[in-house]
Image (tube, grey):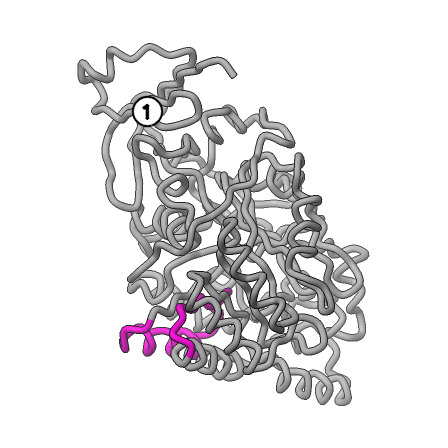
Amino acid sequence: MSSSRTVIRGGLVVTAADEIHADVLIEDGRIAALAAAGTDAARSWTADRTIDARQKYVIPGGVDAHTHMEMPFGGTYASDTFETGTRAAAWGGTTTIVDFAIQSVGHTLREGLDAWHAKADGQCAIDYGFHMIVSDVHEGTLKEMDLLVAEGVTSFKQFMAYPGVFYSDDGQILRAMQRAGRNGGLIMMHAENGIAIDVLVEQALERGETDPRYHGEVRKALLEAEATHRAIKLAQVAGAPLYVVHVSAREALAELARARDEGLHVYGETCPQYLFLSTDNLAEPDFEGAKYVCSTPLRPKDHQDALWRGLRTNDLQVVSTDHCPFCFTGQKELGRGDFSKIPNGLPGVENRMDLLHQAVVDGRISRRRWIELACANPARMFGLYPKKGTIAPGTDADVVIYDPHAEQIVSADTHHMNVDYSAYEGKQLTGRVETVLSRGELVIDQREFTGRAGHGVYVPRGVTQYVG
């Protein structure tokens, strides 16, 4: 590829560490230099392309460390492919995703990873990596974990939920944690007591409680807290760090905060749905609540303040989406008359950066914390930093020109995710992505998609760099 130079002029560069009025020089897909606007250094730059960012923010591309494209679940598949899902991510200012390859019981980690590489290869509009879902822990699996870490798959997800599908018992979890403690891998945990939840599901259905709202009632906050506590203790015994995914309940957050106060390397992620939606949505009439069925489930509204506080105090370090979309028509409807058959998951990969910017507008978090939660921390947590997650000389030129004043109304009519509803339909937001560069190439240019399937490349990851 011939040498190309882009200059972004006049914007406010916002990273997790700084806010500076600076021009940005991009050369051959990387950030080459930053210089204060109007200085001789900045004025001396020549370029093939100049982007005017006056009155705008210049921010790192978002890193969404929790997505499920084309994921099989409950007899169907997540409705976004790697092509449609990464295109929607780009529209929302996200330039890197870390998706989940799945080991099926009776198969190797390698078989699962190869299958996911085949799905994603040549399809993605933005860069991507993989975590590995570990469903079958035995000696062979543990040896494979070492090999995967060495080649850049450095995080492994286990489930205390979904008996018979992804579930690992405490012994299997402990063994995987011990291995991760030795090889530098990071265990990610879906922390819900699935064995107990299955009993409550069965009892609810026997009582004729079949509507979507009962999904939230049986997956109790206490059972999320109990599993979180247990995962923390197992990690402590194993001498391994722990990352708890999609924390939704204040009781579970309290377990994380307590562990962190004790100095343990325990980290937590939450998602926009837990910050902006609630059991009120699950209770919407005419089966509309099915749109909001995900696990961990939405909680009553009074959990939201605790989660926002956790984001401010750094007891929660990352906001990811757990993007796993299923269409209302034909997919969510599989659970009419039985909430336990509703495919679990919400669309959100396109909305995360904007929803978190709204939190900046509302005074819940600072601008720099927005970038920390959405870009820098996920990159650090999963071994992508500083290649991804910041704007500094030498980093990948994954850059978003963000208009903090633009008004938008979220709607399925205008979103780019391959799903027939929006979880945030009608929500008014201030702030919008205007232009997106991925490794220096325009993917979104002034609200027009100029990217292509296959531009995105697979990114091997280092071990976690997050300590704190």
Q: What residue does disc 1 label?
A: 32
Which residue is at 34% across, 50% downward?
Answer: 372
Left or right position of 162 against 385: right
Q: Residue at the location (71% across, 50% down)? A: 115
Question: Viewed as shown, does residue 203 lie left or right of 6?
Answer: right
- Indicate whether 458 appears above or below 318: above
Which SS class for mark 1? strand
Residue 433: x percent and y percent? 47, 35
Vertical arrangement, residue 446 with respect to residue 189, above or below: above
Residue 253 placement (x, y as % from top left)? 40, 73
In the image, is 98 to the left or to the right of 83? left
Residue drawn at 38 percent across, 74 percent down: 239
Q: Residues within 10 Å of mark 1 (few under 14, many from 20)?
A: many
- In the image, is residue 391 part of the stretch drawn in magenta? no
Q: Quadrant of residue 73?
A: bottom right
Q: Is residue 440 above or below residue 380?
A: above
Residue 170 place in picture, x, y as percent: 55, 82
- Tell me the magenta residue range: 238-264
Residue 211 seen anywhere in this rendered image of the structure: yes
Specify the quadrant of the image occupied by residue 261. Answer: bottom left
**Mark count:** 1
